[in-house]
Amino acid sequence: MWKKVANRYVLREEDKLAGSIADWIFNSHYWVEDHPGYYKCDWCGLYKTSTMPITQTDSLCLENPAIKKLLGS
């Protein structure tokens, strides 16, 4: 017989928000793998490796065409 185990790891609302912002920032870039494990945004030239996290302290890609349009650039 299987016992149902409650989820022991629950994110706080602040952590969920930080994760959502980081996802938004990551997805604003157009990542192209330039060498194995090395990624470059084709729009702004930002480099990241597969081990470097994107956090809410990073910025949105201001060269993203949709963001440029919203900013009137």
Image (cartoon, rainbow, N blue to C red):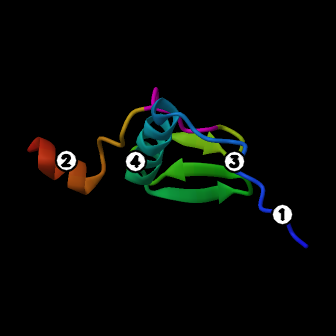
Q: Which mark is residue 24?
A: 4
Tell me the CA gap for discs 4 and 2: 16 Å
The residue range painted magenta reads: 53-58
- Nearer the observer, disc 4 or disc 1? 1
Tell me the CA gap for discs 4 and 3: 17 Å
Q: Which mark is residue 3?
A: 1
The residue that appears at 60% across and 51% down in the rendered structure is 39
Residue 26 image offset from top left, x and y in percent: 47, 47
Q: Which mark is residue 65?
A: none
Residue under label 2: 68
Mark 1 and mark 2 in contact? Answer it, CB < 8 Å: no
The residue that appears at 55% across and 59% down in the rendered structure is 32
Tell me the CA gap for discs 4 and 1: 37 Å
Mark 4 and mark 3 in contact? Answer it, CB < 8 Å: no
Say which element carries label 1. loop
Q: Earlier in the sequence, mark 4 or mark 1?
A: 1
- Mark 1: few, some, or many residues within 10 Å (few <14, many ≥20)? few
- Nearer the observer, disc 1 or disc 3? 1
The residue lying toward the viewer, choosing from 21 and 30, is: 21
Q: Residue furthest front?
A: 1
Residue 30 lies in quadrant: bottom left
Q: Quadrant of the C terminus?
A: top left
Q: Residue furthest left?
A: 72
Give the amino acid type for the residue marked by disc 3 in the picture.
Ser
- Mark 2: few, some, or many residues within 10 Å (few <14, many ≥20)? few
The residue that appears at 24% across and 55% down in the rendered structure is 65
Q: Residue furthest bottom?
A: 1
The residue that appears at 56% across and 41% down in the rendered structure is 47
Q: Earlier in the sequence, mark 4 or mark 3?
A: 4
Give the amino acid type for the residue marked by disc 2 in the picture.
Lys
